[in-house]
Every structure is written in C-alpha cells, then in structure tokens.
Amino acid sequence: MSADSRIQWLHRKILSRSYPNARLLAERFGISHRQAQRDVDYLKNELGAPIDYHFGKRGFFYTSAFELPSMGTDSNDESVFGLSALALPNGTAEDEAIQLQIPYSATIRCRDKLALVEFRRMIVSDEGKHRYRCEFQSVDVFLSLILSSDADITVLSPDWLRSRLTHAAQRILRNNPPLEDET
C-alpha cells in the first residue's frame, strides 16, 4: 500500500472518531512502527492537520475540523511520500504537476433519496439526519452534480467548497438575469 493510502485511511479513522494510533496503522498496513509514526508526523507537520493524541483512548484525534488537501508536486520531485516521479505526456518536468490520489471530501445534506443515486459512488458514509460524507477526485464534477440536481442539497463542509458553490451560483444568476417581456 502506498503512503497516500495510509494517510487516507488514517484520516478516515480519525474523522470517524476511532482514535487510531501508530501501532494500529503499522499492523493494518504491515509497516514498521517507525514508518507509521512518520506518516502521522507527515499528516501533522506537512499537511497541517490539527492532530493530537488522547492518552485515555490511546489514539489520535483532530482538535478542529480538517480536510485533506489536494496534493501535488513537480513531476521530477520524488520526495512526496517517496513516490517515483511519473512521466507526463506533452510537458516538461518543471511545468507538470502530478495529482496524488488523495480525494477531496465533503459533508452534504440531502433528503431526496433519488437524488442520492447520482452521488452513490462518492458517498463513503451515512452520518445520520440526511447527512452524507462524500469523497471525490474532481471538485468540478462534484459541484456539477450538485448544480444539476433537482434536489435540495446543502454542502455542510468544508467551508471553501461551500464558498466555491455559492460563487458559482451567483455567477450563473448574474449572467442569466430574467428576460424582459418583449411585447
């Protein structure tokens, strides 16, 4: 398993309040305890996760809301998670960026079960009270699904995604004012 898979797993476990620890991460992925601790340190120090250790529960938790960022690197940089650089077609090593497979995540509220069929491949958990946690690779595809849905869907988190959706809706309304009666 790659380091980005381990980071995603750790992130999901922390979000679900399972209080994972380095020992559990090491056992789950067959890596050394030292490597597992490096993954935790990377999440905290490099990705800026507000992660802390709960001694009573013997595991990690977030001290505030946190979403994994979209991560990229120059295609000739092998330092991120120790990945080998990938050759990208039609570009130079300096200009191209690779997108790691760490998905974006969001929590939505939707009461329309039929509308949720469109989101089924993105929904990773049912949070109760018509709230669903989604993971997706493309923000544009996710927002397009919301905008094209005939259902009332609310983006509950993260705030940056709510803001982007609001901005898109305002732009659509601004560019499509009601037509004046041409009589």
Image: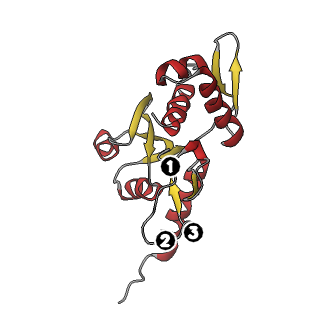
Q: In this rendering, which labeled residue sits more in front, label 3 or label 1?
A: 3
Residue 43 lies, in percent from the top left, at 64, 36
Query: Label 1 near label 3: C-beta < 8 Å?
Result: no
Question: Residue 95 got which mark?
Answer: 3
- Which residue is pictured at 64% across the width and 26% down the height? 37
Q: Spatial distance from mark 3 to mark 2, Cα to Cα? A: 7 Å
Q: In this view of the protein, can residue 177 be seen by the observer?
A: no
**Could you tell me which secondary element the residue under label 1 belongs to?**
loop
Gap in angstroms between the C-alphas marked 1 and 2: 18 Å
Hey, which quadrant is residue 147 in on the image?
bottom left
Q: Secondary structure at mark 2?
A: loop
| Rendered residue at 70%/12% (across/down) | 55
Q: What amino acid is labelled 2 in the image?
A: Gly
Q: Residue furthest top?
A: 56
- Please name the residue that numbered disc 1 is placed on: 100
- The disc at residue 91 is 2
**For the point 69% across and 35% down, which residue is it?**
44
- Three-letter residue code for mark 3: Asp
Q: Which one is earlier in the sequence, the residue at label 3 or at label 1?
A: 3
Q: Are marks 1 and 2 in contact (CB under 8 Å)?
A: no
Q: Position of residue 150 (x, y in %)?
A: 33, 54
Q: Position of residue 73 (x, y in %)?
A: 59, 55
In whole angstroms, how far apart are the C-alphas of marks 3 and 1?
16 Å
Contact, mark 3 vs mark 2 (Cβ under 8 Å): yes
